Every structure is written in structure tokens, then in C-alpha cells.
Image (cartoon, rainbow, N blue to C red):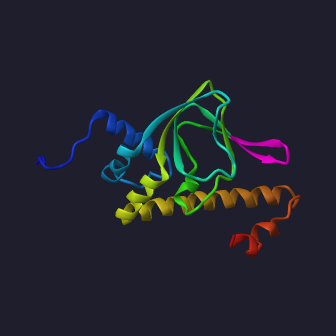
Amino acid sequence: MINPFKKTYTEEEYNTFVFLANMRLFADLNYKQMAHFLPIMHSRSYEKDEVVFFRNDPSQALYLLRKGEVALNIDIDNSFEHLTNIKAPASIGESCLLKKAKRQLNALVVSERADFYVLPKGNIDDILEDNLKIKSKMFEAIAEIYNAYNHRLFKAYRSSSGFFNLQQVYDQNQIRK
């Protein structure tokens, strides 16, 4: 039996849900939960060599890469060390889910063009404050993302024969800052 009161979605909304489901941050949300984000998703395009954000910028938005490629790098002294390239579909800037976070990396468009959905931090915070199930699922996803980063960090450390001081990562005085 068809429920006439069940919310229906447009084809464009379904396509957006499929796009969101391809990113770990949204993968555990159902369509009804994802629908909360639709009104705050703003389209933004960047051209080749345009900076999406710089390291140490306040983390004020989540960027969902719909099309294109972005390089992530870190500036050390007066040079940049390339870390990786991210291709669509992907999210960058997940740190905006954390309080008073700053960007840890630089993000630079390397394709001819990159198209994003940009979700402002304040709007995300409002959704999470009003929807504890969404908040729980998204913070579990962010914990899994950071756990995977830690796993790769330790793997790189082991393979580098300890060429950097891993103790610095666990300095309790640095963690509290």
C-alpha cells in the first residue's frame, strides 16, 4: 500500500542523496536525514590554481567536491609539500564540525575547474543541534575518518624507520591547545 503522506523527492534531490552517500561523512544518513542539508548546500566553482582554503584559516565551511580535482598540501617554511590530490566525489574541510577549528592543510584546485557544494558551519551546527541522530552518525563517521588517518600515519611512520619524532604527536601539552 502506498502511503500518501510519505515525503517524495525530486530526481535532482535523489541525485544529491546518491552524491552525499558516496562520502563517508554522510554515508550512514537516510534520505530524510540528508534532506536537512539540501537548503544549506550552496554551489560554488573554482578555476585552476584557485585556493579553496589556506592552512590556519578558520574552518567555517564543509566543501563537497562534485566535479574536478583538488591538491592538498602543507606549507613548511617558504615551500609547499604536496600530500595528495582529491577527486570528486569527496569532502574536504571536515574540521568545520569541530569547535574553533582551523584548517590544517591548503586546498588548491588543480583541474581546469572544480565544482563544490559549500555548507556553512553555522548552518551545519544548527542541523546537528536539532537532530541528535544525525549528529551521532556524523560524529561517528568523523571519528572513523580520523581513525583511518591515524592508521595511515602509523603505517607511514613504521615504513619510514622513524625519521620523524612520533612522540611530538602525543605530547599532552600540544593536545590541550
Q: Residue furthest bottom?
A: 172
Foreground pick, 79 / 136? 79
What residue is drawn where x is 38% and y is 57%? 127
Tell me, yes or no, whether the highlighted magenta stretch contains residue 35. Answer: no
Left or right of 91? Residue 102 is right
Residue 131 visible in the current orientation: no
Left or right of 129? Residue 99 is right
Foreground pick, 138 / 50? 50
What residue is drawn where x is 33% and y is 39%? 14
Q: Within the image, what quadrant is residue 159 found in?
A: bottom right
Left or right of 170? Residue 145 is left
What residue is drawn where x is 89% and y is 58%? 163
Horizontal and vertical percent position of residue 18: 40, 41
Horizontal and vertical percent position of residue 56: 68, 52
* Image: magenta residue range: 72-84
Q: Main secondary structure of the magenta part?
A: strand
Q: Residue furthest top?
A: 112
What residue is drawn where x is 81% and y is 70%? 167
Above or below — where is 2 with respect to 44?
below
Residue 97 visible in the current orientation: yes
Horizontal and vertical percent position of residue 93: 58, 49
Above or below — where is 105 with respect to 86?
below
Above or below — where is 81 with respect to 28?
above
Q: Within the image, what quadrant is residue 108 found in?
A: top right
Horizontal and vertical percent position of residue 123: 42, 53
